[in-house]
Image (cartoon, rainbow, N blue to C red):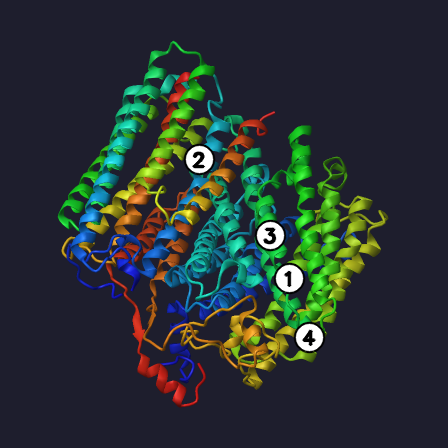
């Protein structure tokens, strides 16, 4: 199977993301990477849970005093919706509808950027309240965990834009289909991590 | 090579079948998205309501998170389809290792 | 086409190795780099032993001793043992499963260069103001307080090389999952391939906690975070846990490939099928699984409480069971076989009592109550040197002799090999056996000297003499390598005469595409099966056709180089050097630009045409 081969709607294979050996390797390899990422984030969660509310003096803000529901809720909605838009992108990839796929990917990136914007706004707020990266072990652990996730979102954005930019003129083929698919896996994984962040960090932080 | 495993000789038939299949899949994905939204609402609602005790809220929102992640993994990331044996094995092993670490950090780091 | 057929100038060869994505050449790179660091770590070991040879010695100062001891451990584990093991995995595993290359050749090269630059970065600390001095475990209480940049070198260097190892592990896993030849089912895979598989899985799950630990340490030391600052609410035990969640699987990452090499050796030189193949596989997987449940046995004296100590003690002792299964299977493989005592086989045979001794002291240390007595004494030093030298290093030496012909097409001299073996084995036991007693007599580990009249003199002198035996053994090996390379007597595909697995079915060294036609695997020990039926070669599973190969690339080198540069910037940024931040940015830019280039520039590889392959056969070049 030549990867450069041109396809039509009729000849486009059902599983374009796994049609070549390279694609199969990419697929398994990326899932394994996500397995490793699970341990990475688990270690960060563990560290956060061990250092939650550990501040040098009691006058400093605790989780309970810091977090606000509306902001977290808005961020959650943005990221959750971006997960759905990337599902739509993959749906159109399956149907060999390149333009539509790009449109939905663009939407995904937009929502991701919105999420990042909210996160930056949130962090600046906390800094004003005296909760900084260097102010306490709690601060270090919080910014490291949430920041690692934010960094993943930022990397995903760059990745998505690079993919869109590189393939904007050539349409779908068996060389780039697995790349799009793997990106969508990554994006969903980011959302999986966020589900635990908003639950464990924010909601449980507010409950006390 | 073996890319056209569903091909019955008539590409048209195959295409229509596939279209139907992915439409159906898309419907499941919309349903799971709705469910995820719903679960998120409940989780945020419970915390916003402030009336529930800590020991009631925390297990419930953790459970909701787990359910939501299962939707994400099995529908959005297609782990419900075949060919995901190695991914599940490694993802769940990673989860096992990670949960052991979390358990440790919550029990024996401070004393 | 063949790269081996042509004579090339030095520049061309160097460029070839800088850009190669061929697993066999990457294996050679790993072997050279790992061998170099092995010698460096060995020199550090010699300095330690010279310093401790007599009481009140001042061969090195206390501070320098701390640096040497730290770097000895770190170098040997991360920069010598792991890459040497990776060398054999790269050289042999793809051949054993009948693959033409690994799943991600580019990533394979990237993994090597990350390891290499990480290792170079770490060792540059010697010349740039002092090496790390907080022990190879770099416990936070020491590391945070350590002056100068030593620990920063440790943190950044290991981070870079750790990423390389992680992606190398993923690469091996995918290769084994997806690229086995027709008929090569999981339960027909050679034991070395199985051990590569389990080891890579351990790498996948063990390295992320290390990454996190190193990130936290880096944030604390370089960016003002407070993870381990107790006055700011931090907790140093977090480092200990993260380090050992990685660190314990790490020792299995080292020992499992050793088990794999010895399993191959026993079967080949007993000229008999490996006894209890499926139980061997089961034991490997079980050891890998249990390896994640036992890390806190390194921390019994931290004060985890009796419940945690009991759980981890029992889990630790449980590992003795699958290990015992393996030991007995090896013994039974030899039993009734027609054993040939070649150099690799001598290592394999002597490995059994040496490693069992290390295992027995392991069970002693696993008894949490007794561990309070052994902890931080030379008993522990003796224990882990018995498992790592008696297991891993013996396996690396065995593997060097066993696979040298496959990697370089010429045999190491057997007589000199046996001299190396004798010197090394005697030296090893001389050095470390006595250290058990030193520990039980109360000599603490990691001290730079001791006083006369405490009863430690003779034992320490004996230990030092043993170390010199090992050093001479290694020197003989190096001479052997030089002499062998100079003579360069070419050998055929199966130089040991008793090869059982696929790698022995193709020329030494293999052509760069490995298999002209993918072989059909009809059972365990595929090549042996064919030989027993009187066939000279494997039955092909496909007609001769075009072979798709990946393109060479310089980008792995530049990606790794960028991180290497950035690490300097990150490190000197705390000294408020004006150039530090720009250097960090430039380094990261190099890395990200290389990655960007990689993603926008299509790399479809190239094809070797059928006609070229057929032509070569006609000319009498075996393929």
Q: Nearer the viewer, mark 3 or mark 4?
A: 3
Q: Are marks 4 and 1 in contact (CB under 8 Å)?
A: no
**Element on which disc 1 rests:** helix
Q: Which residue is mark 2?
A: C224
Q: Nearer the viewer, residue A199 or C498?
A: C498
Vertical side of B6 occupied by C316: above or below: above
Mark 4: give few (<14), some (14-19) or many (20+) Cα within 10 Å.
some
- Residue C195 falls in which quadrant of the image? bottom right
Q: Where does the image place residue C279, in percent across and percent down from the top left?
A: 63, 55
Query: How far is mark 2 from mark 4, CA to CA?
Result: 57 Å
Query: How far is mark 3 from mark 1, CA to CA?
Result: 24 Å
Residue C282 badge: 3
- Disc nearer the start of the sequence (2/1): 2
**Element on which disc 4 rests:** loop
Left or right, residue C172 beside residue C247: left
Q: Which residue is mark 4?
A: C342
The chain containing the residue under callout 2 comes to C
């Amino acid at each position: 199977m030549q990867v450069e081969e041109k396809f039509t709607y009729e000849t486009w294979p059902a599983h374009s993301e796994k049609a070549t050996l390279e694609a199969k390797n990419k697929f398994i390899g990326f899932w394994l990477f996500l397995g490793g990422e699970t341990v990475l984030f688990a270690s960060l969660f563990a560290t956060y849970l061990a250092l939650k509310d550990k501040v040098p003096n009691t006058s400093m803000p605790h989780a309970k005093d810091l977090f606000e529901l509306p902001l977290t809720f808005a961020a959650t909605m943005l990221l959750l919706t971006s997960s759905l838009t990337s599902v739509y992108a993959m749906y159109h990839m399956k149907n060999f509808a390149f333009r539509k796929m790009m449109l939905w990917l663009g939407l995904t990136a937009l929502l991701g950027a919105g999420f990042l914007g909210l996160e930056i706004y949130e962090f600046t707020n906390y800094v004003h309240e005296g909760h900084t990266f260097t102010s306490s072990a709690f601060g270090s652990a919080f910014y490291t965990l949430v920041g690692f996730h934010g960094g993943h979102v930022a990397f995903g954005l760059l990745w998505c834009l690079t993919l869109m930019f590189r393939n904007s003129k050539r349409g779908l083929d068996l060389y780039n289909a697995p790349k799009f698919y793997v990106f969508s896996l990554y994006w969903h994984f980011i959302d999986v991590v966020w589900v635990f962040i908003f639950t464990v960090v924010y909601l449980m932080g507010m409950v006390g | 090579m073996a890319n056209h495993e569903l091909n019955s000789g008539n590409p048209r038939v195959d295409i229509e079948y596939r279209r139907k299949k992915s439409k159906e899949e898309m419907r499941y994905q919309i349903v799971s998205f709705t469910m995820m939204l719903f679960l998120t609402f409940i989780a945020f609602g419970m915390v916003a309501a402030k009336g529930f005790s800590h020991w009631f809220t925390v297990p419930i929102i953790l459970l909701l998170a787990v359910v939501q992640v299962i939707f994400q993994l099995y529908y959005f990331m297609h782990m419900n389809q075949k060919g995901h044996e190695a991914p599940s094995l490694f993802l769940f092993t990673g989860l096992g290792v990670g949960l052991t670490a979390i358990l440790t950090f919550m029990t024996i780091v401070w004393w | 086409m063949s790269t081996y057929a042509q004579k090339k100038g030095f520049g061309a060869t160097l460029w070839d190795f800088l850009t190669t994505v061929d697993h066999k050449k990457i294996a050679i790179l790993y072997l050279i780099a790992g061998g170099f660091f092995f010698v460096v770590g060995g020199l550090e070991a010699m300095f330690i032993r010279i310093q401790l040879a007599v009481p009140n010695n001042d061969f090195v100062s206390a501070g320098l001793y701390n640096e040497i001891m730290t770097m000895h451990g770190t170098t040997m584990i991360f920069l010598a043992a792991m890459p040497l093991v990776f060398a054999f995995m790269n050289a042999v595993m793809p051949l054993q499963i009948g693959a033409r290359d690994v799943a991600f050749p580019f990533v394979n090269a990237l993994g090597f260069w990350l390891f290499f630059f990480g290792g170079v970065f770490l060792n540059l600390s010697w010349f740039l103001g002092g090496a790390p001095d907080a022990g190879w475990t770099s416990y936070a209480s020491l590391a945070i307080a350590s002056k100068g940049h030593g620990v920063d070198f440790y943190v950044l260097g290991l981070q870079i090389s750790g990423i390389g190892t992680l992606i190398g592990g993923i690469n091996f896993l995918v290769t084994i999952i997806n690229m086995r030849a027709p008929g090569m089912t999981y339960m027909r895979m050679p034991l070395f391939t199985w051990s590569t598989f389990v080891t890579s899985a351990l790498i996948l799950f063990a390295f992320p906690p290390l990454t996190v630990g190193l990130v936290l340490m880096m944030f604390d030391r370089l960016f003002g975070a407070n993870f381990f600052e107790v006055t700011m609410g931090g907790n140093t035990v977090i480092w200990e846990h993260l380090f050992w969640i990685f660190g314990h699987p790490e020792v299995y990452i080292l020992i499992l490939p050793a088990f794999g090499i010895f399993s191959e050796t026993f079967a080949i030189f007993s000229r008999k099928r490996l006894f209890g193949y499926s139980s061997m596989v089961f034991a490997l997987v079980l050891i890998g699984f249990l390896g994640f449940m036992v890390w806190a046995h390194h921390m019994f004296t931290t004060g985890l409480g009796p419940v945690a100590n009991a759980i981890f003690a029992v889990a630790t002792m449980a590992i003795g069971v699958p290990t015992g299964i393996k030991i007995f299977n090896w013994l039974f493989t030899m039993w009734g076989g027609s054993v040939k005592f070649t150099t690799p086989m001598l290592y394999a045979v002597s490995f059994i009592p040496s490693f069992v001794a290390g295992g027995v002291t392991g069970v002693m240390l696993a008894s949490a109550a007794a561990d309070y007595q052994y902890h931080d004494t030379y008993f522990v030093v003796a224990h882990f040197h018995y498992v790592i030298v008696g297991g891993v290093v013996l396996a690396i030496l065995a593997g060097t002799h066993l696979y040298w012909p496959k990697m370089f097409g010429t045999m190491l001299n057997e007589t000199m090999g046996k001299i190396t073996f004798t010197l090394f084995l005697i030296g090893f036991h001389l050095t470390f056996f006595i250290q058990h007693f030193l520990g039980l007599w109360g000599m603490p580990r990691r001290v730079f000297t001791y006083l006369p009249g405490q009863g430690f003199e003779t034992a320490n002198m004996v230990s030092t003499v043993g170390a010199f035996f090992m050093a001479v053994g290694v020197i003989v090996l190096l001479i052997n390598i030089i002499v062998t390379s100079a003579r360069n007597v070419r050998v055929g595909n199966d130089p040991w005469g008793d090869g059982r697995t696929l790698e022995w079915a193709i020329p030494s060294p293999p052509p760069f595409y490995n298999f002209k036609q993918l072989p059909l695997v009809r059972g365990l020990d595929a090549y042996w099966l064919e030989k027993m039926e009187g066939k000279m070669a494997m039955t092909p599973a496909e007609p001769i056709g075009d072979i798709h190969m990946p393109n060479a690339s310089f980008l792995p080198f530049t990606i790794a180089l960028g991180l290497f540069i950035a690490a300097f910037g990150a490190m000197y940024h705390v000294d408020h050097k004006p150039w530090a931040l720009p250097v960090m940015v430039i380094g990261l830019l190099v890395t990200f630009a290389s990655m960007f280039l990689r993603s926008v520039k299509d790399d479809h590889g190239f094809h070797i045409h059928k006609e070229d392959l057929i032509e070569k056969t006609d000319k009498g070049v075996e393929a």
